[in-house]
Structure formats: C-alpha cells, structure tokens
Image (cartoon, helix red, strand yellow):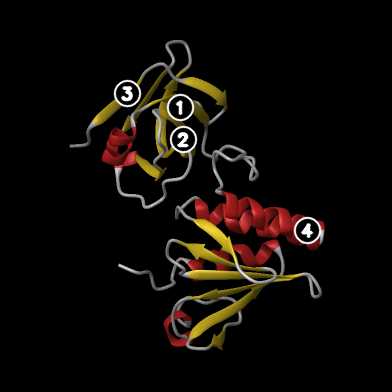
Amino acid sequence: MTLKMTVTGVREIKVGIWEFDVPPHQVRHFGNTSHAIGPKSVLLFSSYDYDPDNHHLHFDLDDVSPINVGTTSTTIGMAIGSGEEGGDEAPNTDAHDPMFFGPGDREFLHLAKSELSADTAQVAEQLLLGVRRKSAGDLKRGKSRNFSETPDNFWYVILQPRIDEISITVRGAVSHFEPVARLEIKDDRGNTRFKVKSKDDLPAALQIIFHAIRKS
C-alpha cells in the first residue's frame, strides 16, 4: 500500500513548478541525495494532483524524489511526469534557472552558448537537462572546456567548438557499453568515449550515460 501525502500552502510559480515549505530533515525522508547546495530544497514529482483552489499538492510517497536538500524550509517542487493539471509532459523548465541547475552546470551552459553554434548549444542544454532529470549533481570545470560530474564522476564532457561537437567519456570499458550503444564508441584509457553531434543523438547518448558504472 502506497502512503498518500498532501502539501499545503503551495504557491504555483508556473505549470508544473511550485514553491512550498518542507523542512530539510523531512525532505530527506523522501529518499537519499548527496546534493546539498544553497538554501532551497528541490523535489521531483513523477505523478501528482495539484488543487489550485485550495493550494494543495497531493501525491504518493513513491512518486516523489529529492534532488537537493537546502538549508531552509523553502522547497521547489517540479513535475517530471503526469498529473491532473500537468498533462503527460514535463514542464518547460528554464535550463538556466538556479532552482534546477548548480553553478557548475550553469557555467557549462553559458560556455556552450558562447562557443558552440546555436543548434549544438541547444543539444548541450537538452543533454544536461536529460541527465539532471534522473541524476542529481553538478558539473565542475577543469582545464579549458572540460567538465567532470560531481560528486560521482561517472561521465565527463568536453565542448569542442572547432568541430562544433560534444565529446563524452563514461566510466566503464567499451565492452560494458557495446550491448546498449547506438552511437560509435571508442576506448578512452580504459573508459569509453563517444560524440554527440545533433539532437538526434540525444536518446542514445543518455542511454549510454546512464549505463555507466557508478560508485556504490
């Protein structure tokens, strides 16, 4: 039996995004996350029922996941699945919104926009959004245009403006990815590297990224 819950005093920011009060220790009750940046907590809802008249948000415990635990009770809720109000699509989240991306993620997006073509910069944005919808974290810039994932560097991304492409390295040998890879993959010092050239590559790229070996 699934535990049903209700949050009261909900303020709708836009369709599928709300603000309400949940203390940090209660946010942790929804699941584990190693991401703790800034004052606001962030919860993702795969299914929900929002009552705008009474400012209530109803949901099952199994349908909510934390991606950040803040230092205050101010909490942002974001829909990533169906709901009575939201239909079957996720809200059109602003990829530069600090409620969703950390400072390293935003630096990556800014650099992509300034150094890649408009189309490839959009691919970079959608790639990162696809990762963050399933995995909390923040990118950390290294030398030049290299970014590593934190806290677990299971994927590593390099912007390549001269050829207008995105290079990604994922943790694990080529043989680990061969059963799922729908893009060309190559060895990268014991790990696996591939290129993302267009939006058509995104589904295959995300499948490879989430097949990467994670630290326990």
Q: Are marks 3 and 1 in contact (CB under 8 Å)?
A: no
Q: Are marks 2 and 1 in contact (CB under 8 Å)?
A: no
Q: Badge 1 local density, few (<14 within 10 Å), some, or many (20+)?
A: few
Q: Which residue is mark 2?
A: 39
Amino acid type at circle 1 is: Glu
Q: Which mark is residue 153?
A: none
- Residue 128 percent coordinates (x, y): 59, 56
Q: Which residue is mark 3?
A: 6
Q: CA distance from mark 4 to mark 3?
A: 41 Å
Q: Are marks 2 and 4 in contact (CB under 8 Å)?
A: no
Q: Which mark is residue 84?
A: 1
Q: Nearer the viewer, residue 111 or 91?
A: 111
Q: CA distance from mark 3 to mark 1?
A: 14 Å
- Quadrant containing the C terminus in the rendered view: bottom left
Lower sequence index among marks 2 and 4 = 2
Lower sequence index among marks 3 and 2 = 3
Amino acid type at circle 3 is: Thr
Q: Is residue 65 left or right of residue 39?
A: left
Amino acid type at circle 4 is: Asp
Q: Which residue is mark 4?
A: 119
Q: Secondary structure at mark 2?
A: loop
Q: CA distance from mark 3 to mark 2?
A: 23 Å
Q: Are marks 4 and 3 in contact (CB under 8 Å)?
A: no
Q: Secondary structure at mark 4?
A: helix
Q: Secondary structure at mark 3?
A: strand
Question: In terms of image quadrants, where is residue 198?
Answer: bottom right
Q: Nearer the viewer, mark 3 or mark 1?
A: 3
